[in-house]
Amino acid sequence: MNQVVTGKLTTWQRLRRAVLGSPIATKRAHHEKLSVTLGLPVFASDALSSVAYASEEILHVLVVAGIAGFTFLTPVSLWLVVLMLIIAFSYYQTIQAYPAGGGTYIVSTENLGSGAGRVAGAALLIDYVLTVAVSISSGVAAVVSLAPSTQDYGVWIGVTAIAVLCLANLRGVKESGAIFALPTYVFVVLVLALVGTAVFRGVGQPAIQPTIHPPQEGFHAVTMFLLLRAFAASCAALTGTEAIADGVGAFKEPAAKNAGRTLIAMVVLLLVMFVGISWSAQHFGVQVMEPTEPGFKTVLAQLAVAMFGEGPFFYVIQIATAAILFLAANTAFADFPRLCSFVARDGFMPRQLTSLGDRLVFQNGIVVLSVVAAGLLVVYNADTHSLIPLYALGVFVSFTLSQAGVCRKFVKERKADPANARRHTIHAALSGFGAVVTTVVSLILLVTKFSEGAWLILVAMTVLLSVFSLIRRHYDHLANELNLRPEDTVEKVQTIALLLVPRVHRGVLRAIAYAQGSARDCRALHVTLDPASSEKLKQEWNRLGIDMPLVILDSPYRSLVEPVVDYIDETTELFPDHMVTVIVPQAVPSRWVQGLLHTNAALGFKLALASRPQVAITNVRYFLK
Amino acid sequence: MNQVVTGKLTTWQRLRRAVLGSPIATKRAHHEKLSVTLGLPVFASDALSSVAYASEEILHVLVVAGIAGFTFLTPVSLWLVVLMLIIAFSYYQTIQAYPAGGGTYIVSTENLGSGAGRVAGAALLIDYVLTVAVSISSGVAAVVSLAPSTQDYGVWIGVTAIAVLCLANLRGVKESGAIFALPTYVFVVLVLALVGTAVFRGVGQPAIQPTIHPPQEGFHAVTMFLLLRAFAASCAALTGTEAIADGVGAFKEPAAKNAGRTLIAMVVLLLVMFVGISWSAQHFGVQVMEPTEPGFKTVLAQLAVAMFGEGPFFYVIQIATAAILFLAANTAFADFPRLCSFVARDGFMPRQLTSLGDRLVFQNGIVVLSVVAAGLLVVYNADTHSLIPLYALGVFVSFTLSQAGVCRKFVKERKADPANARRHTIHAALSGFGAVVTTVVSLILLVTKFSEGAWLILVAMTVLLSVFSLIRRHYDHLANELNLRPEDTVEKVQTIALLLVPRVHRGVLRAIAYAQGSARDCRALHVTLDPASSEKLKQEWNRLGIDMPLVILDSPYRSLVEPVVDYIDETTELFPDHMVTVIVPQAVPSRWVQGLLHTNAALGFKLALASRPQVAITNVRYFLK
């Protein structure tokens, strides 16, 4: 049930609630936690969906070696399997070691120091953005494979998808879990069916030779470097493995246990689907196409057609693929804002990122992610293949730091309780091994992808890290300027109230009373624009016997603001330790358009006095019926 | 000499002064008055420049009657001369009758009542806008005739010209007089030279037959209606005649006398140039061209070429023509804002239009005129011929009303002093006659131009007039709501100060002191977003022994604003006759970009409390070094 906070609602509030739902009370926070069944789609859709492009990306590299290279698809895929198992295992331990969750950033900060933590944080933030960009563009590819007529509108489809995700997540995580469960499970089932059919038909039959048109530069030999590049390309499939560990906090109690189960389920599914697709694609001689080619189809789409023809199965699997890929981006939407809030809490990003919105989500982080990712999508024209080189590097850097951190932790713990020294040693060894492996992979990624775009990631990280420290410096500076010194106390401050009086009317009477009530020393200021009316004002003032000195200011240049500013400056010079309150009476018409018939004096004063520390400005409004 | 008002100048002020010049003191107002020599270019450039297109517009109509119609150019022009004399004479009297100036609007209001005044005002305002649009587009035509390569950029040239005029006028009328004198006089001299040459060469020689390509619908007979349409087209030449009478106030003393002289000078020059051009054009068989035709040249340009070839004279006269036409628009810039201020003073237009800027000009009126005219130019693609039908109707309506008004005045005066009854009768008769003639002309204009666009003017006037009355109603309503009743006095008002305290730091200490100083009943409000920090706050509060009750508000939905608003609503219900001051401490960083790292709480409160009449919001700012 959604309670309403207050009786009065502005139109904006109404609209906001229609779209984002009513506020959710803090005490209901735990209601938003996820079960394994909902946790899998929310946190694993990223990893799972990557099978939709991982095999294809390997082919993209191998194809330059023609048939010869093609036959390496399955082997390379198997390397990835090994890597995946190592990382999964190592993250399983992370979850046990950190049942409270928080993941890479917190782990590295705690065990390797703030510097390492920030590097991990920056790397992950960049990677979350790329997760969105890559998943969305690959989802677009699925749509195009299904409906060739949409080939020219890829970018728009993608941007729209991001907008929808943004809103869904602003509504809150529970809802997103619900929205995202169905497509994820449909996709998994259909891919398994597809792979199953392929294996069933294919095993024992001779493999079909693909007809490969040689690339411009002609065929290359199958070099180790080529295979490494292929491997590097496939690493994208592993991004998102950390999502669960980072998000343990979002799971139902027992969080660690549930998170662990989800992780295992994810890895098993991922392995079967990925290896299956790679093997089938190779066995049935599927070939890679450029998204701009007429009649473009993804590898998965071609496989589906090869197995079941362009029938209903093909349509359904394409839709499911598109759906899960759009939702894969949601992993980032679940994690990016949370990570931002951690980093911001430590003062390396703007404080606003730490504030939980009234729907219990870090709304600012969600918006930032949407904007940046959409920008990237437009720049790269929603082409998965050209985004991939940027991808995965960041995530492997963070893998390394996180596992190194966990390893360090176990080493410490071994010292702490020698009783279980042996168990701790094993844990440490495993995590350490993971760290070493991912370090190697990171290097492979950097070297093989450098010229294709990996260098951009280095630049981005440098920028992010320096921004982090600039922001932190500002907050530190702020703190030591604002923090109370022992000698600080509240010293009495005399206030002088200056009431601006254009002419005496009922609206001003109230302001006069307010001024008298708000300061012992209060004076009325009148700027003479036309001598006659000033005369009239003086008489009125005396007639009403108002107990407040009336100061008449000349305005040789007919400006309303400047004489007042000058008067204030003189006053503050006379009383350097006083505060001056400028009281500006303002008419508030019943309809906004009537506002055009009134000059908003207050605004002018605000601007003119912006730099005067001793001055405070108050609008006393009188409402017109 | 331009004094500077205050030592501290913001960048914006600096920039503003660089472009518009420093403020001019009110006492120096009379320095801005105009002599005859400067008055002629400022107020007569409109009328004088119209010779650049008047003859052409007549031809535009006559051309459909082929050679036969062509021969009527001079006769039709002569009708206009007669009309011009009648109007000029009648306006000469207006000036004498109203030496203070103010012109049509004031004259009609005084003698025929506010209704008639408003009609005249609306008509003139519309016509001033059209003066700008027509003169500018005709100026563009002159430029294009000189440099055919600019044919496609007409609109942009025009809009730029308007922008320049706008700035020049914001600087002040004296400067514009100086800027505009030279081109006006150059133009007059050159046209007189051109006409002189034409007459000298042409008289006694047989007239050259123009080669006229028949319009699509073929040639028509020369009907009376056709001649009337031609005549109507030429009436544009008379617009601007009223400018001097309206602007008497801007002339040096003796204002009436100087204005009168200027009027006479203007009419004489106008007559000679106009008749001269018409006769020459007819005699040398000049033909009308469409502005889109390749090698387009205006009638005046063709005449110049015919007389002196495409040599230096041609270039200079084209430049002078373009210049005076762009400046003709300046007449409107001198008069439109002044008229606005009169109408606004009577409460029919927004008050802001009455305020003299620091350069002694009605800046708001100038800006409004520029924007509207530029819009019109864009819509009509800067084509003089298609704008002309809208033109002149408004001005003749106002002619009629003004002269009827003057006539009425003399009738009254005759009653007043029977001694000079006879003189008054003659005056009255002359003005009356003028009124009758202009009424007839107005009808001719309306009928002959109705379908071509005159109907638009009727619509525009209806809209303007209803807006006038709506605005007036609002101001009346305002007045009677705000005007003091005899029983009104200043009743004491109790104020309650509510200080928002996120946490206790040095910036807040000052705000606390300020709050204590500004109300007897003041309380600190703290919204609990995280219980721990609230606890800390309480301790700090007690430790410092702050003499102010600390109210802790829960925020079940983590909103900072809503709990405060609720609290305020409760308070104002308890004390319906109190005022509540919400004091929001706010950090002001030294660099604006750092502002992004601070949430501007005050803004949220302003929006949320906008509709609460008892509430006033004060920002107490603390500046960060």
Image (spheres, coloured by chain):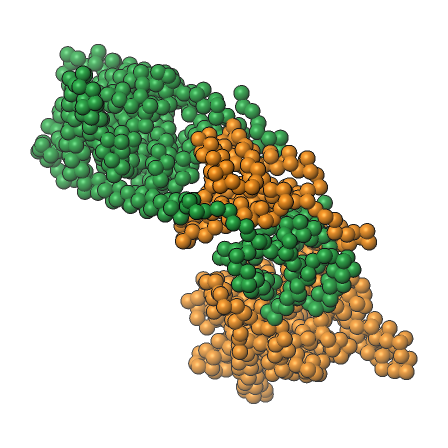
Chain colours: A orange, B green
Tell me the quadrant of the picture where the C terminus of chain B can be found: top right
Residue B441, placed above or below residue B527: above
The quadrant holding residue A441 is bottom right
* Residue shown at 63% from the left, 45% from the top: A520
Residue B3, placed above or below residue A501: above
Q: Position of residue B623 (x, y in %)?
A: 68, 46
Residue B485, placed above or below residue A34: above
A212 or B17, which lies in front? B17
Q: Position of residue B119 (x, y in %)?
A: 25, 38
* Residue shown at 54% from the left, 66% from the top: A166
The quadrant holding residue B534 is bottom right
B183 or A59, which lies in front? B183
Q: Position of residue A338 (x, y in %)?
A: 66, 68
> Is residue B365 toward the left or the right of residue B89 in the image?
right
> Is residue B45 toward the left or the right of residue B23 in the image?
left
A581 or A211, which lies in front? A581
The quadrant holding residue B277 is top left
B399 or B116, which lies in front? B116
* Residue shown at 74% from the left, 60% from the top: B541
Is residue B292 visible to the viewer in this orientation of the structure?
A: no
* Residue shown at 74% from the left, 49% from the top: A491
Q: Position of residue A294 (x, y in %)?
A: 45, 65
